Amino acid sequence: MTTIKCGNMTFSDIQAILFDKNGTLEDSEAYLRSLGQKAARMIDAQIPGIGEPLLMAFGINGDHLDPAGLIAVASRKETEVAAAAYIAETGRGWFESLNIACQALEEAEKYVGKTPSPLFPGSLEVLKSLSSAGLKLGILSAATTADVQKFVITHQLRDYLELEMGVDEGPGKPDPILFLQACQALDVEPRTTLMVGDSVGDMQMARDGKAAGCIGITWISNSGNVKGADVVINQLDEIQIVEA
């Protein structure tokens, strides 16, 4: 059991820490913004006039990505369904609308996904340190499991992680079942597990899952994005091991 200190909060008897991916470990803002812009343009080419409303729905305004917006925090399936709903408003059938949305996001992903997003500064060092202290570490992301695995391989993180979990089918964040399933996969109790994330969904999921604590990270210093956190940090290296 390990004691973790974060700001003015101390968490005792910790066995595991789960991390969100986008916006927590991975500086994915540029990628997600480009993904949404490309998908919106592709859909607009088929259905003129829908591009701008879609960008707003995605949480994209010019060069700004809302870190609490749809494309930043929703699962892939949720993003597809939301885009399809806008398409369906033009009078197209639901299955046609869903097909257009899925194809556009898939094509956009191929186009913008050639350059991997970087890790946030210090992320690798923090994972190394926490793993060396004997903590079980995992990623619990709204991205697909395949995306999580690709991220882990790209940045050579597999030596430090025991879980690479995304959302493929079924419930997404903030459903606590995801947190509970992750704890079960790591063979730890929720009450001994911390959640580190950059969204309200991460905080609510962990709270409802009876986590040991919720650490909100906001690299852009906007604590409103992590409402419900027990403590808010601006860099991952603020997670300190007090006693191992």
Image (cartoon, helix red, strand yellow):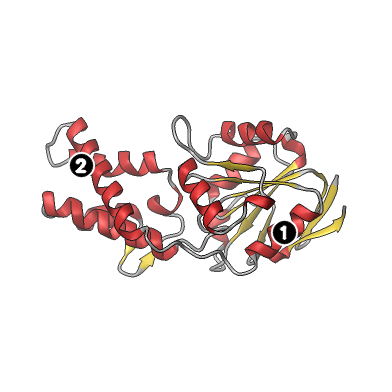
Residue type (three-letter) at the residue carrying disc 1: Lys
* Relative vertical location of residue 72 with respect to residue 163 in this rendering, above or below: below
Can see residue 233?
no
Taking the spot 63% from the left edge, 36% from the top edge, the residue there is 182
Which residue is outermost to the right? 243
Which residue is drawn at the image coordinates 54% and 53% (left, top)? 153
Q: Which mark is residue 146?
A: none
- How would you rate the neighbour count of disc 1 (Cα within 10 Å): few for under 14, some for 14-19, many for 20 or more? some
Q: Amino acid at mark 2?
A: Ile
Q: Residues within 10 Å of mark 2 (few under 14, many from 20)?
A: many
The local secondary structure at tag 1 comes to: helix
Q: Are marks 1 and 2 in contact (CB under 8 Å)?
A: no
- The reply, left or right, for residue 19 in relation to residue 16 is left
Does residue 179 appear to the left or right of 13 in the view shown?
left
Rendered residue at 48%/38% (across/down): 167
Disc 2: which residue? 100
Left or right of 221: which side holds 12?
right
Position in image of residue 48 (x %, y %)? 11, 53
Q: Position of residue 193 (x, y in %)?
A: 73, 42
Q: Quadrant of residue 207?
A: top right
Q: Residue at x 70, y 65 (%)?
A: 237
Q: Give the number of the mark in front: 1 or 2.
A: 1
- Residue 209's spot in the image, x, y percent? 65, 35
Q: How many marks?
A: 2
Separation of marks 1 and 2 at Cα, in angstroms: 42 Å
Q: Can residue 54 be seen in this snapshot?
A: yes
Q: Earlier in the sequence, mark 1 or mark 2?
A: 2
In the image: residue 75, left or right of residue 241 = left
Q: Which residue is mark 1?
A: 128
In depth, the one of 165 and 20 nearer the eye is: 165
Quadrant occupied by the N terminus? top right
Find numbered disc 2 in the image and state the secondary structure of the residue it sits on: helix
